[in-house]
Image: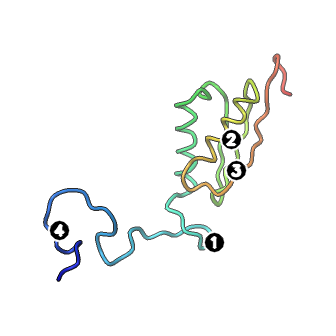
Amino acid sequence: MMPEHEQDEGRDGYVIGPASNGPDVELTGARGVPSPHSDAQIASDVQTRYAASSLASCRLDVRVADRVVTVSGTVPDEAAKHLAEHVAESVAGVRSIRSEVTVRRGGRVA
């Protein structure tokens, strides 16, 4: 009897699970740690998410090295600071973040 996945070859539709005997994706990353995302892709993803959020008007700089994201800039309140950190952490491929975000209160940096 043929395995179920071989019986379904030739049928149209979605494939769930491995479709070949090889790896699903070849992954290489910093220090041999698997990662499908480059530093440049991670930085782009973080910036895209900032632009689509309530942080769009904030001046936030994103730098990525070895999948560690450093976010700097100013935001209007603590909630925005936490959101900036959370958004960066939630991007696929991020190993950790460093926050250099400052809160601007009443026209001055706190």
* Label 2 vs 3, first from the N-terminus: 2
**65, above or below 18, in the image:** above
Of 73 and 94, nearer the camera is 94
Tell me which residue sits at (49%, 61%) in the image. 36
Tell me which residue sits at (65%, 60%) in the image. 66
* Label 4 vs 3, first from the N-terminus: 4
8 lies left or right of 81: left
Of 65 and 20, nearer the camera is 20
Q: Could you tell me residue 3's position as x and y percent? A: 23, 78
Residue 4 position by quadrant: bottom left
Local secondary structure at mark 4: loop
53 lies left or right of 83: left
Q: Quadrant of the N terminus?
A: bottom left
89 lies left or right of 41: right
The answer for how far apart the CA atoms under marks 3 and 1 are is 18 Å
**1, above or below 62, in the image:** below
The answer for how far apart the CA atoms under marks 1 and 4 are is 40 Å
Neighbor class of circle 1 (other Cα within 10 Å; few <14, some 14-19, many 20+) is: few
Local secondary structure at mark 1: helix
Residue tagged 1? 31
Residue tagged 4? 8
Neighbor class of circle 3 (other Cα within 10 Å; few <14, some 14-19, many 20+) is: some
- State yes or no: discs 4 and 3 in contact (Cβ < 8 Å): no
Q: Nearer the viewer, mark 2 or mark 1?
A: 2
The answer for how far apart the CA atoms under marks 4 and 2 are is 45 Å
The answer for how far apart the CA atoms under marks 2 and 3 are is 7 Å
- State yes or no: discs 2 and 3 in contact (Cβ < 8 Å): yes
Type of amino acid at the residue the image marks with label 1: Arg
Tell me which residue sits at (70%, 50%) in the image. 97
Q: Could you tell me residue 7's position as x and y percent? A: 16, 73
* Numbered label attached to residue 85: 2
Residue 46 position by quadrant: top right
